[in-house]
Amino acid sequence: MSDFNPYAAPAADLLVPETDPASALVYADRGTRLGAAILDAIILGIPASLLVWGFYAYQGLKFWVPVPGTRGIVLGGVATLLASAVDLAINGHLLARHGQTVGKYVCKIRIVKQDGSLPTLVDSFFKRRFLFNLAGRIPVIGGVLGLVDILLIFRSSHRCLHDDVAGTLVVKQSVPGREPAA
């Protein structure tokens, strides 16, 4: 009898190695990416929270009390836009010029396209950050999407869903003229 089973799952190895030998890029490890995300959350959280708190106070509302109905959805959308504007003001230049946020800069990692080139601001900010922040505002779906996004980092390529959407990788920052550390 033959071992061939037309209903079997594909047997090809679809996992990406830790290092892409074609481009000599070394993927940033999960801990470093987490550290950069925590730094970014602290750096962005304070001014963004103050701005959004001020916006809610201007509306006669309390920042920590949910607003029901359509008004709550609109206010949440405006709050997301305000927080994203703060993010763009703080990280826009670094993302456009170096593929880094402040947290990634400190942790010596950066965002690159899959071919190793620098991503555009559309890829590095709007597809990776803004789109997922906005989607996170959708009740239930946003939470599930956010969880799936984060959990995909446990693939061998260390790529999250936002990396797949933007066509990017997060790699260790190499020093010009030297090979990246393995």
Image (cartoon, rainbow, N blue to C red):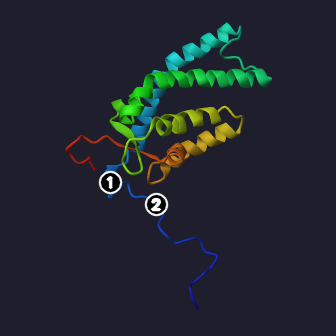
Instruction: Determine the residue positioned at 61% across, 74% down.
Output: 8
- Residue 72, placed above or below residue 145: above
> Quadrant location of residue 92?
top left
* Amino acid identity at mark 1: Ser
Residue extending farthest bottom: 1
- Kindly state the secondary structure of the residue where label 1 is placed: loop
Which sits earlier in the primary sequence, circle 2 or circle 1?
A: 2
- Kindly state the secondary structure of the residue where label 2 is placed: loop
* Amino acid identity at mark 2: Leu
Instruction: Determine the residue positioned at 45% across, 48% down.
Output: 158
* Mark 1: few/some/many CA within 10 Å (<14, 14-19, 20+): few
* Mark 2: few/some/many CA within 10 Å (<14, 14-19, 20+): few
Q: Which percent across, then down, holds residue 165?
A: 54, 46
- Residue 63, placed above or below residue 42: above
Instruction: Determine the residue positioned at 19% across, 44% down.
Output: 177
Is residue 104 visible to us here?
Answer: no
The answer to whether 10 appears left or right of 61 in the picture is left
Using the numbered discs, state the Cα–Cα distance from disc 2 to disc 1 in whole angstroms.
17 Å
Considering the image in quadrants, where does the N terminus appear?
Answer: bottom right
Instruction: Determine the residue positioned at 28% across, 50% down.
Output: 182
Judging by the rendered image, the residue that carries numbered circle 1 is 23
The answer to whether 71 appears left or right of 26 in the picture is right
Is residue 133 visible to us here?
Answer: yes
The answer to whether 95 appears left or right of 108 in the picture is right
Give the camera-side residue of 170 and 4. Answer: 170
